[in-house]
């Protein structure tokens, strides 16, 4: 097995493969990330409705921080004065931060994108801000991020090929500028982001140009933006052969449990998605029996837990009737328990995939997992 002790540098090892699927670990000074890995989203320095200790105990090795939110509140320089994001939120493991660009374009007001960056007004207080590749890397450094993402331009699909190409080429120029701004930070990494929409030739051109920059890892961006799952999977298959096998692949914003199975099968190592946490706050439980909407009246007198076989107290110790009551009553505990259950289920799914790949039975594991979902009511 790999040496899983934290190391002074950033190192990725593949321990086993099963078809295109891989399992291994990223070792960094702040800890080890077992792959394939799911990163809970910790938008405003908190994984919503969770204590940091709970997130660790349910099996997460790394969490994601959103640069856009944190630069606006509490502010990047202020976060640095307060000792950085890890200390601030009491998470001592690795943190990956996004560049902020995606959320600037989807959340901020009056945003204007040009060749040098993006100008926007805060959705919180309307103040004006400027995000360039250099400033994004500077902010991520001030936050204390272990894995920093390049600033890129993500085009929503469907889109004209010319727009997709323009955004892909801008993202490549920004990757070079981020690479220069990042410099040499031992133990930390900067990942490039493959763009190119749903156009295979543009996807390949983007991947090859990024690989020439010899980065520590590669994200696949521009997906999970409304395209059918088949298109997303086709783009992963298009890009995968052009990414180095000995470096991590991170599929941004993905996804449902089925997305995770099908993407790991195609060679993806890292994921982040708001699905488990957001769904938990809306009364939806992800379980090995499938997705269960606890608002539904059918649960009102169901004394069974969500999953008596789970190690997670939220899944094992509370009746569906109680969870239904909490959700219908809009009680905070309902959000807490369902978020806890959902993140635990996602981590159990990742752990199951890692073991299945090690034992050469990934496709059987995937089929059995999907079969289990059929038994749930909607
Ligand atoms: O190309 C990207 N670049 C940088 N960040 C991203 C984040 C992303 N998140 C999703 N999907 C999940 C979503 C969350 C909110 C709206 S879509 N797709 C994504 C694509 C990108």
Image (cartoon, rainbow, N blue to C red):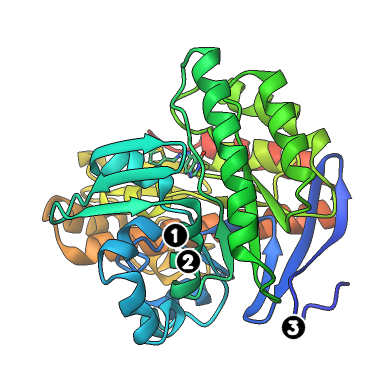
| Distance between the alpha carbons at the discs numbered 2 and 1 | 5 Å
Position of 199 compared to 43: left or right?
Answer: right
Tell me whether the residue at label 2 lies in contact with that at label 1, contact meaning CB atoms closer than 8 angstroms.
yes
Q: Residue at x 42, y 81 (%)?
A: 84
Name the residue beneath numbered marker 3. 8
Name the residue beneath numbered marker 1. 135
**Residue 355 lies in quadrant:** bottom right
Q: Residues within 10 Å of mark 2 (few under 14, many from 20)?
A: some
Quarter of the picture holding the N terminus:
bottom right
Identify the element where label 2 is drawn: helix
Along the line of sight, which residue is nearer the eye, 65 or 348? 65
Q: Residue at x 30, y 55 (%)?
A: 320
| Distance between the alpha carbons at the discs numbered 1 and 3 | 26 Å
Identify the element where label 1 is drawn: helix
Position of 6 compared to 327: left or right?
Answer: right
Q: Is residue 86 above or below residue 17?
A: below
Disc 1 under 8 Å from ligand 1? The reply is: no
Along the line of sight, which residue is nearer the eye, 14 or 206? 206
Along the line of sight, which residue is nearer the eye, 284 or 9? 9
Name the residue beneath numbered marker 2. 138
Q: Residue furthest front?
A: 116
Along the line of sight, which residue is nearer the eye, 376 or 221? 221
Between discs 1 and 3, the one toward the N terminus: 3
């Amino acid at each position: 097995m790999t040496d899983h002790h934290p190391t002074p540098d950033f190192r990725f090892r593949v321990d086993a493969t099963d078809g295109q699927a891989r399992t291994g670990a990223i070792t960094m000074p702040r800890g080890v990330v077992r792959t394939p890995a799911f990163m809970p989203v910790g938008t405003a320095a908190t994984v919503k409705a969770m204590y940091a200790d709970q997130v660790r105990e349910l099996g997460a090795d790394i969490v994601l921080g959103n640069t856009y939110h944190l630069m606006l509140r509490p502010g990047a320089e202020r976060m640095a004065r307060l000792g950085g994001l890890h200390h601030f939120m009491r998470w001592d493991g690795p943190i990956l931060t996004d560049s902020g660009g995606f959320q600037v374009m989807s959340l901020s007001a009056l945003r204007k994108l040009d060749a040098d960056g993006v100008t926007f007004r805060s959705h919180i207080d309307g103040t004006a801000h400027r995000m360039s590749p250099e400033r994004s890397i500077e902010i991520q450094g001030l936050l204390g991020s272990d894995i920093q993402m390049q600033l890129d331009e993500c085009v929503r699909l469907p889109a004209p090929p010319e727009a997709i190409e323009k955004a892909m080429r801008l993202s490549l120029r920004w990757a070079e500028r981020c690479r220069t701004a990042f410099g040499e930070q031992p133990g930390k990494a900067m990942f490039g982001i493959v763009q190119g929409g749903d156009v295979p030739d543009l996807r390949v051109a983007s991947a090859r140009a990024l690989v020439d920059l010899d980065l520590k890892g590669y994200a696949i961006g521009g997906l999970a933006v409304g395209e059918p799952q088949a298109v997303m999977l086709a783009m992963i298959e298009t890009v995968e052969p052009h990414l180095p096998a000995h470096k991590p692949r991170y599929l941004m914003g993905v996804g449902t449990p089925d997305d995770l199975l099908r993407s790991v099968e195609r060679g993806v190592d890292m994921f982040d998605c708001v699905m488990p946490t957001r769904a938990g706050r809306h009364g939806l439980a992800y379980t090995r029996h499938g997705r269960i909407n606890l608002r539904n009246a059918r649960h009102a007198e169901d004394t069974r837990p969500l999953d008596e076989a789970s190690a997670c107290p939220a899944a094992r110790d509370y009746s569906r009737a109680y969870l239904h009551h909490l959700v219908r009553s809009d009680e905070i505990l309902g959000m807490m328990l369902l978020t806890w259950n959902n993140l635990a289920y996602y981590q159990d799914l990742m752990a199951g995939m890692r073991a299945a790949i090690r034992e050469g039975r990934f496709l059987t594991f995937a089929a059995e997992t999907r079969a289990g979902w059929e038994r749930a009511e909607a």
